[in-house]
Image (tube, coloured by chain):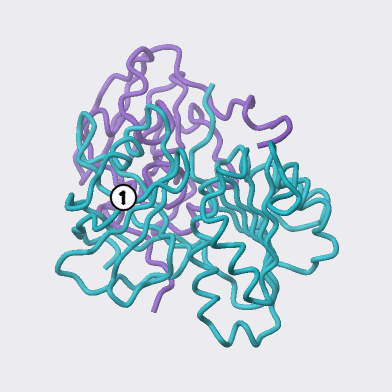
Chain colours: A cyan, B purple
Amino acid sequence: MPGDVLTATIESARTLTSDVREIVLAPVNTPPLNYTPGQWISLRLPIGDRPPLIRAYTMATPPAADGRLTLCFDRIEGGLGSEYLWAVEPGNTLEFSGPLGNFILPESGDLVFVAQYTGIVPFRAMLLGLAGDDAFARSGRKVHLIYGARRREDLAYHAELRAMAATVSWLDYRPVVLEGATADEAISGSETDVLEAFAREWLPFTPMLCGIREFTFPTRALLIETFGFERRAVKVENYNGPTAR
Amino acid sequence: MAGTNPYISTPEYEKPKRPYEITIIYEGEPHTFTVRPEEIPYERSGLPGSILDICEGHHIALEHTCGGVCACSTCHIIVKEGWDSCNEATEDEEDQLEEAPGLTYRSRLGCQCVPNGTQNVVIEVPRWNRNAVKETPHD
């Protein structure tokens, strides 16, 4: 049940960029979690004045037969949850519940994924799932992925995504960076620059956006105001709450 | 990333400027506290000064599986009194609220609902929301 509290052992951890890390969890004494790519689990971290501190993290891979869960997160300076997770080591245990969330693939039509920084995580799980789906490959559906960060080295999973785009016909990968773009590695500019330039030729599609609100909200506004999407037709997953006065 | 973001500088709610009284009805029992502006935020979940923040700061275990970032509906609460002193729900909050069981016209997400202190507030945590999580489509 999604509400049950489960336990997992940290099996491995690796650093993907200067401030992004990936950990692999091996759930203890429980059958493999049956989730849909794009869903998240709720970690119950043993920290803070009154633990547990609850934080949500999206799985970075589709369900694995052995039940292992891969999470990817960025380090936020002063962020209780991310600082704690950054320091966990293999052998440590974590409590969690889930899976949860409705940011999942629609069943038909072309897709445009727009991600910034660790907003790539649910899309990576979806893409890995689609890469193993022969029916999707035969369907003629396309996925356009716009993935941005400040610098090329901030793009977690970039090499993997490039390799995937080179081997499957349905994926169109558009990495975009603000600084130091080289023509063979990434486009120079912002995610919305790329979206604005190409969205019309990609229509019709379902847009899916993931990142912090300061990124997803203006991107959604662009899709609504420039390309005529209904607000609810734009699927959005935010990683943070609203701003405060 | 690039460009000027119109949302970063836009305030979405107003924190209280004076103390006010809040009653949380939890498992049928009323718990009354005084919320003092200088004590906000109490914890690290939900908007500062939100019902979730206040509950966390007063040992009331309001569910919030997403960590209080408006990505689920498990912190569903009902505002029984003081509705006009609470910030307006955004469309994104309303989208999440639609997933909550037992929705009412006075329903809010605890992580997003911030009273501004101009009225005392009475909040009910629905019994059906205790330890509830959103069931999502999966095989």
Q: Residue at x 54, y 52 (%)?
A: A237
- Of B30 and B47, nearer the camera is B47
Spot the residue most to the left.
A29
Residue A224 image offset from top left, x and y in percent: 76, 51
Residue sitting at x 34%, y 50%: B65
* Mark 1 belongs to chain: B
Res. A114 visible in picture: yes
Q: Is residue A233 visible?
A: no
Q: Position of residue B1 (x, y in %)?
A: 65, 37
Rendering coords of residue B58 (x, y %): 23, 29
- Nearest to the observer: residue A170 or residue A12: A12
Q: Secondary structure at mark 1?
A: loop
Instruction: Classify residue A32 by image quadrant.
Output: bottom left
Looking at the picture, tell me which residue is in the foreground, A91 or A197.
A91
Q: Callout 1: few (<14), some (14-19), or many (20+) C-alpha neighbours within 10 Å?
A: some
Residue type at the position of mark 1: Pro
Residue occupied by mark 1: B126
Q: Locate the C terminus of chain B and report the quarter of the image it occupies.
A: bottom left
Q: Residue at x 41, y 74 (%)?
A: B138
* Left or right: B99 as drawn, with respect to B63: right
Q: Nearer the viewer, residue B39 or B9?
A: B9
- Say which residue appears at 24% left-offset and 31% top-offset: A48
Q: Pinpoint residue A226: horizontal percent, then vertical percent.
A: 83, 50
